[in-house]
Amino acid sequence: MIISIAASALVTYTAPKAAGSGIPLIKAYLNGVKIPGLLRLRTLIAKGLGVILSLLGGLLCGKEGPMVHSGSIIAAGFGRGRLPFCGKDCLLFEELRSDHEIRDLVSGGAAAGVSAAFGAPVGGTLFSVEEAASFWSNELTWRVVFAAMTATFFTNLFLSATIGHFTQLSSPGLVRFDIFQEDMAFDLIEFPIFVLMGVIGGLIGALFVIINYKLTVFRYRYVRKKWMMVAETAFIAMATALAGFLLIYSLNDCTTAEPYDEHHATIAKVFCKGNHEHNALTSLFLSTPESTLKGLLHDKAGSYSITTLCIFLVVFFFLSVWTYGLSISSGVFIPCLTIGAVWGRLLGIGCMKLFPHLIPINVFINNSIYLSIYLSIYLSIYLSIYTHKTNNLGKFALLGAASQLGGIVRTTVSIMVILVECTGDITLGLPLMMVLIISKWVGDFFSTGLYEMNIHVAGIPMLPSEPPPMFEDVKASDIMSKPVVCVHPICSVGKLVDLLKVETSCGFPVVDFPDERPTLNISRKRPETYGKMKGLILKSQLLVLLKYRIFAAEGAVQPRCLKSAKFRDFYNVNFTISDLNITDSDRECVMDLRKYMANNPFTVHSTCSLPRLFRLFRGLGLRHLIIVNDRNEVTGMVSRKDLAKFRAEAKRGIVQIETLEISDL
Amino acid sequence: MIISIAASALVTYTAPKAAGSGIPLIKAYLNGVKIPGLLRLRTLIAKGLGVILSLLGGLLCGKEGPMVHSGSIIAAGFGRGRLPFCGKDCLLFEELRSDHEIRDLVSGGAAAGVSAAFGAPVGGTLFSVEEAASFWSNELTWRVVFAAMTATFFTNLFLSATIGHFTQLSSPGLVRFDIFQEDMAFDLIEFPIFVLMGVIGGLIGALFVIINYKLTVFRYRYVRKKWMMVAETAFIAMATALAGFLLIYSLNDCTTAEPYDEHHATIAKVFCKGNHEHNALTSLFLSTPESTLKGLLHDKAGSYSITTLCIFLVVFFFLSVWTYGLSISSGVFIPCLTIGAVWGRLLGIGCMKLFPHLIPINVFINNSIYLSIYLSIYLSIYLSIYTHKTNNLGKFALLGAASQLGGIVRTTVSIMVILVECTGDITLGLPLMMVLIISKWVGDFFSTGLYEMNIHVAGIPMLPSEPPPMFEDVKASDIMSKPVVCVHPICSVGKLVDLLKVETSCGFPVVDFPDERPTLNISRKRPETYGKMKGLILKSQLLVLLKYRIFAAEGAVQPRCLKSAKFRDFYNVNFTISDLNITDSDRECVMDLRKYMANNPFTVHSTCSLPRLFRLFRGLGLRHLIIVNDRNEVTGMVSRKDLAKFRAEAKRGIVQIETLEISDL
């Protein structure tokens, strides 16, 4: 409990953005949403240290989400970071200092994180393609693969050096499922079982997401204070430990089966008397989630009784649902895989129990339909088990694990590749893909994926790849925000300072009012239009211009032109207008914005339809778009939030249209 | 020769777009270029039948490119196709009848093609991501994987039924490299050899591309007549056959090594006398390229002498360079892999020859630097061979094959995954990725990839993912085409008919001239602007409107509104204005375009810079963009061709900027 409290306090009090898996936020960032604090050094430390503490505290979580987030922060650091001790002029890579480059770096960092976690460079790349990235280019592919490969290589090198000899390169990832000793071949006749496994994974996955959704909403409403978040973590840590120990002591679950060598240290005799006996539940509850998972995949048939597995499944399921979403640094991959491996193993045992001599032939003798159904099911199970002459529960456990993870996060191909790379065995590729696609379909029928749910609940304005249907009639003029704060090309410093003190918008359209005096140039709440569109100036640009005092008295010659490199120097440097020293006489000066404004920001006409606006935002990764009328006059502005409000969700076969509340991040 | 002539004639005379690999054209199509005839049923037949004939004729080509192209045509058929016997109203899938959907279908079809060829569903998907697609979305990922998986499954089912039992699912793809029996483990100490292999692959790959480039340019200039193309194919077929047989008869290349079982049938004794002897060259030259490749990967050390391999390498290299680009349906994957496997095997033999007792220690005794370099190289080779205690040439051959293919087509991760899926062995993943990335780097230093070269030479206006550098100062007004043919919202039918007879443009801006009479509404060669932008009408829309006679005499009430489904019915139906019966009295009528035109086509200001235009075209997949001035008046139009002219190419470390000639497809 003490360690868990430390884990939670670290995240809650130093870097709240380090809470949870991090994958949903990275996904939103790559979609084009700005999330303050997501890619800071402080978040990296809280994330990395936090996940170690969370695991140490015995909470049911994995380290893959935090690895993805950490990888992304490190990658972004190359573009954003500056060395703390050598001031603002000491930039690492000046040419990477743009949103576009940093987005690409983050894609690579996310892939490298997955890659290092599982030793799966291709899986990591695919994860980045499938789950994280909203923008992808051919050039990016090999760069990301290179990053992912390097990550795997160095993890391998260091781990190999720790375990054996560093040149052997025997431990590619932090989490390995080891190579299966059994024959993993499959037969067409087993496909009905695979379909069944996909369905089960999808159903349990949807249940996981729905319960977690209720829980998350509950937390957003009632667990808002920081000390409450820490207290909740402490409570769950206690519940997890209590549940484990109570079950171990209350169940006389002795077995002589030798467990898979990795978790020897965790077995305990409890009430068992025989020399080689131990309590089976101890090897499940008293290990790290990874080692439990490994045991479930590799332990011989008979290692766990059906009761043991059933109890473990129920307890583990509810504890992991409860744990995900706490204010700690925690991933969800390994708990999901473990849940799946348990029921996969149970299903395998169930199949094995259907021995030939158990068929009550006389029951079916007069009922041919029932007989034929039973026989076909029976035959498929029988053949699947006995044609291979192995009691191969590992196969069922692996497929169950895949199906479960797929049912919860709804990722298909990357999970399959990660699992193939993790087990080093490609034989099960097709069945893995099958269960993953089926579990995705079944899960999608009932709920969204876990990460989408997180993004949805957090009110992050994420834009899906396709515009929502049935909004063809909504026009830009219906959703645009008014009034728009505009500035004049030659603008008084005083007005600008007042503007920057109040406004939170990132950019201001520069407009022309030929009939007005420059001193009246900041227009607000005008009825129809805000003047002819000339360009766009960013808030950050205005700040830099004011800092360098690029203004002069009205009529006087403007100072020298500021180079664009100067603006880049201030990339990601936070300072506000109150940090600048603007005197009253400065306020009387005017600034000529014409040299600095972007001349041709993207604009659309106010009658433009929602799907078209949507494609524009999504295709170009925009955050704001200026709406103009026929005469190229600014009439409004549409932000990403205005668009993300419109959502359509297909649930249980019915498309629901809803407008979302978007939070201010 | 006769079969080769048939192969060439089929392609040349019935469907010229079926020539070559098809991957470059599919790539261009997915980038947004319209290529007439690319996705027609006739092309599918020529492609499928053509590749069978090409292989049968003994030409050195593979079937993967044609598989990709065929897959794409079949996929596009779901959206574009109509059943020939039930008229235009019988649509297969009406909702797929849009450019956007068909583009996604083609991405899936390409993946399914690769997947069926190699039994590699993940590799196929990655190929589609990395090589083919310009637009990708998360939703598309699992759909494409599903398509690819289904393709593999059915190939597997049919092939398994042919070879053994259909439920065994033992033959996932048409081309299989079979599982390696040897231990494929590797050690850090072998990495220098992998680097060397990457460099060799890149160099030979660049040579391949450069020679083929000269050859392609030569063919574009001099081999223009159809009979000449067929004659060239016949000549190469003869050369290929002659080279093989002459070498077999001139070289007394006898060996007793038992070849890998797949190509037993092709070995011949020639001049060999022993009972178990055969001519080694026959097993290389008298097989299909695939079976040669399989032999090179799996045959035991000693199956081929160094002389045999050297001669085969040189002859095979030049013949395949010469073959690629002929007017036949042919892929380039298998020849590339074979070239690489030959030199990979040679390198492996070279490594094995460096036996310990060969070190001339006395030479180095006084030269410590030379000694240490030699020793480190020697050690790495020695350890790589002898720590594993196998004479494993298969590993070298596989890595060589990968490096060579990577050096020619410059694809990285998808080749790696395809090879891993093809051999069923994931152990070599990291070294494969290493050689592929290095060969890509080395190759890129000297030339572009083979497919890019094809696209470049063919003058296809393909837009890369990033705008070319150093064109920041080029404005839209510099590159836009003038004059623009504009129409009035209420336009006379006569003018429209005249317009449609002459103009080849796909869309016309609809503009407003309040000061002019509607009869003078088609403006051309006006000095500055073409009137205020109102909307855009497509040529195909005008044709449908004229066909349904949606016009009335001036002042009269316009006919009922045409539903948008009617326009969709005519998707991909080719008819021209001369097919319509427009009388002279019709010509006097006017058509109200306001109900049908797109109200808000994307427009940009004429001062917009080239990189920004580029991002807009690339991000939204545009073909045309209207350029307006301050007053929202049309001043010009930029097409994809205008943009694709600007290219920057990095060759030998120097960035070259060039403007390209774009052909009319």
Image: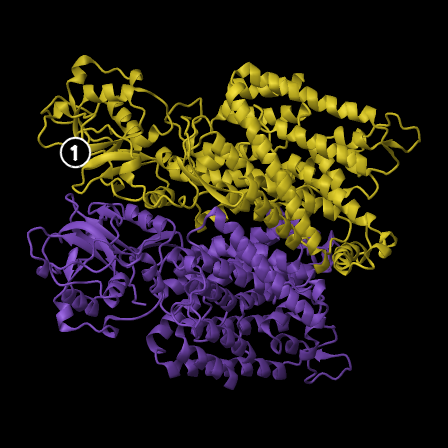
Chain colours: A purple, B yellow
Residue occupied by mark 1: B531
**In this image, A177 relative to A82: left or right?**
right
Question: Does residue B98 appear anywhere in the picture?
Answer: yes
Does B41 appear above or below B628?
above
Write the residue at 56% across / 16% down.
B228
Q: Quadrant of residue B64?
A: top right
**In this image, B318 relative to A587: left or right?**
right
Of residues B426 and B313, which is closer to you in this image?
B313
Mark 1 neighbour density, 10 Å: few (under 14) some (14–19) many (20 or more)? many
Of residues B33 and A431, which is closer to you in this image?
B33
Quadrant (top left, top right, bottom left, bottom right) of the C terminus of chain B: top left
Q: Quadrant of residue A296?
A: bottom right
Dot 1: element: loop
- Residue A365 position within the rendered picture, expressed as x and y whole percent measured from the top left: 66, 50
Does B579 appear above or below A264?
above
* Chain letter of the residue beneath label 1 in the structure image: B
Does B67 appear above or below A631?
above
Tell me the amino acid under the disc marked 1: Gly
- Residue B595 position within the rendered picture, expressed as x and y whole percent measured from the top left: 20, 34
Does A256 appear above or below B331?
below
